[in-house]
Image: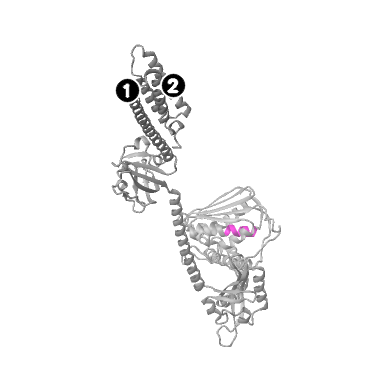
Amino acid sequence: MALLPSSLSQPYGSPPWARYGLALLLTGLAFSFQWLLAPWLAPSPYFFFLSSILLAAWLGGHGPGALATVLALVLTFFFFRPPTPHHLISSALFTGVSALMTLVASRVRLLLHEAHAARASAQAHGQTLSITLRSIGDAVLTTGPDGLVRFINPVASYFTGWRETEAIGQPLSLVLRLVDPSSREPLDSSRFVSAEARPVQLGHPALLLSKNGAELPIEHTAAPISDPQGHSLGTVIVFRDISARFREDHERAQLLAREHDAHLEAESQRERLETLFMQAPVAICLTRGEDHVVELVNPLGQTLVGELLTPGRSVRESFSGLDPNLLHLLDEVYRKGTPFTGHEVPLRADFSGTGHPEVKYFDLTWQPWRGHAGEILGTMGLCAEVTEQVLARREVEALASDLQKALQIRDDFLSVASHELKTPLTSLQLQLQLLWRSLPETGADGQPHPARKRIEATRRPAERLHQLVNNLLDVSRIRAGRLALEHETVDFAALLQDVVTRAEADAAGAGCTLLLRAQAPVIGRWDRLRLEQVVTNLLSNAIKYGANHPVEMTVVQDGDLARLTVRDHGIGIAPENQARIFQRFERAVSERHYGGFGLGLWIVKQIVESLGGDIRVESQPGQGATFTVALPLQPPPSGRSDSVSVSHAAS
């Protein structure tokens, strides 16, 4: 009743003075009508007075009706009826009828007022309930006994994707589509509208499929609605969004899964580290504290040092004969945290346990062992025994020393043998040359003198032998660093022409035609004899491997360089052999088909490089070879103008 307006909270909606004044007014009006109409109609005075009493009781209640009754009796007695017995009976009847009409009118008015108040209250409560259901944060949906939607608030409309006008009158199973989150099976919404008057379990989770196909995790509750007589009016369903809790549960599950995986990974890492530590190919030792007490040793460490390193003993106690400097370095690693690495460190101890100390060599690495906070707990040592490697290296060094001595003896022999062979060969060549010149060109029969042919045939092997001796002598000089270069002004084109002229006879014997293209002059400062040796060796090499084919030679000036090109059209050189032919005693072909020591190109390369230039070859098998020499016109800045000493390490 507190929610009703004041006009409805009281039966008559007006103050008492107004209601009683209305009774007086109505009685006065009835008396006036009776007074005015009495001369013509002479009606019973009670007709108008009953009307006024009825209106006063209807509009004012019991009190105004009684007041109107009393006033009507008084006015009738004094103005319209004489006091007779008949009048008294009429008055008594009038009074009874008036009282009855007053009671009936007031009671009917009260009942009508209460019914109106009840309807107004129901409307007010309905509006309040509707506003409340539409304003709460949970989704609310109601159905009738037939399972059709009767009400849906905005939150439920938003979750389901159904507008209120569309959802009203639709089957619940069409508007509220639920799926079991674990099995992904559809849930039967008809269970919400069953005849059983019992609520569905509170907080039952499900997945809501909206009209547009989106999925929303919800928690729902359903309860039946019935009237006071127990008749079913439908079902009210309340559900709420639990996406945040669903995400939290999902994240919690993921976190637990990651924690489980991390635990398994940590355990796996521990097992791997333990396996690595125990099976490491190097000895590992952990020591704790400034006394370097052994904490842990892997099996290989036990194998290397026997029982010397045992947990609980310090390194000083284990290796009593350890170098004090190593102990000092170990202390420095613990105090300063600076790693220490030692190679081939000798340790003297009773490694075999026989009572006889022996020396072994180790590669040691000691570094600080730190805790989680970075503090130094001790040291960690890694040790690999290299005793066999040290002994093998020393043996190799001894063998290398012996080999170096043998090579030196060989070089000395080659040098002495070359000098000893060169003197008689030179004398032989001079005697053959004098003999050849002393003979006439033709004999008595006019033919070339036969002795000259024999002498010429003898001169060629002698010159070949002389060239081989010179090569051996150059090898010994180059290895000894005694090859001197005398720089002078040389016309490269003229020098090439001289070499070609001297080689024409050899070329003709091999069936080669020499083609010379020289840009004259090409002036530079080189060692004439060594440059002539370079050209001669390259030309001889081209004639040897390019027999029966032409040999082309070119020398040009290219800026501050002179470029010599010697090209043959012989057997060619495979790409994998092109770098090897410039090494000593190396050949790209079999010795059975081509003679020589394999020194010519090596000597050429050494001389060219000593002159500050380089030599390259381009060739393909069966297509000949092209050698290109590039020499600076002036000596290298590091050299002297008169002589250059060249030395090379023994190979």
Q: Which residues are magenta?
A: 528-536
Q: Say if mark 1 contacts mark 2, CB within 8 Å.
A: no
Nearest to the observer: residue 483 or residue 244:
244
Question: Which quadrant, please, contains the N terminus?
Answer: top left
> Is residue 166 visible to the viewer in this orientation of the structure?
yes
Of tags 1 and 2, the one toward the viewer is 1
Q: Against 384, is 633 above or below? A: above
Can residue 315 be found in the magenta stretch? Answer: no
Helix or strand or loop: what does disc 1 sit on?
helix
The residue under label 2 is: 25
Nearest to the observer: residue 400 or residue 347:
347
Compared across the picture, whether 226 is left or right of 504 comes to left
Seen at 60% across and 61% down, the residue is 606
Q: Which mark is residue 154?
A: none
Question: Which quadrant, please, contains the C terminus?
Answer: bottom right
Residue 646 at x, y percent in the picture: 65, 63
Helix or strand or loop: what does disc 2 sit on?
helix
Residue 96 at x, y percent in the picture: 34, 29
Determine the main secondary structure of the stretch shown in magenta.
Answer: helix
Q: Against 367, is 633 above or below? A: above
